[in-house]
Image (cartoon, rainbow, N blue to C red):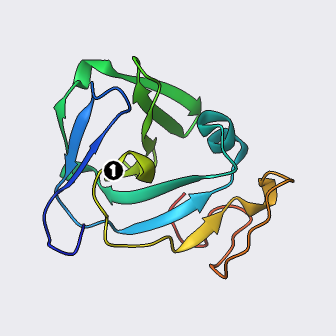
Amino acid sequence: MNDSAEALNGRCLCGAVRFRVTAPVITMGHCHCSMCRHAHGTAFSTYCQVDAAAVEVSAGREAITRYDSSPGAAREFCRHCGSKLFYRAREMPEFLWVAAGVLDDDPGVRPDFHIFVASKAPWHEITDTLPRYDEFPPGDGH
């Protein structure tokens, strides 16, 4: 959560979906997997891990569409504008990953790591010193 300990607000591009995160962000990271790259159309995606119970959709719940991108994961997005909103891992239902770019407020944390670096876009060069993992970090529960 941001420094003032207030809820974080987020929304999709068209504004149909609006939500609040009422608990602090647990961690933030960059994912370089091919599914994130294709879903976001970018070199990587950045997600904030939060307690699933702390995410309150205040508008547009009916506009959220779910896509089961793999046997263990689902991606949720706005059916009107296509904004990527949430990622859910079936093995970790207590958590939700919020696409950092749809947050209106500063989450008060910065990225901690890069994951799925083994499948990163060949044209993208990682230039920071954050820890890098070829897949999931050891012990993350996946």
5 to 73, vertically: above or below: below
136 to 36, vertically: above or below: below
Q: Position of residue 4 (x, y in %)?
A: 14, 73
Instruction: Name the residue at 38% across, 32% down.
Output: 13
The C terminus lies in quadrant: bottom right
Q: Residues within 10 Å of mark 1 (few under 14, many from 20)?
A: many
In this picture, residue 8 sits left or right of residue 82: left
136 to 53, vertically: above or below: below
- Amino acid type of disc 1? Leu
Instruction: Name the residue carrying label 1.
Output: 103
Nearest the viewer among 33 and 127 is 127
Q: Position of residue 61 (x, y in %)?
A: 23, 25
Count of numbered tags = 1
Q: Position of residue 87 (x, y in %)?
A: 45, 43
The N terminus lies in quadrant: bottom left
Instruction: Name the residue at 64% across, 52% down.
Output: 44
Instruction: Name the residue at 33% across, 50% down.
Output: 103
Nearest the viewer among 137 and 11 is 11
23 to 5, vertically: above or below: above
Residue 26 picture quarter: bottom left
Residue 49 picture quarter: bottom left
Provide the secondary structure element on which disc 1 rests.
loop
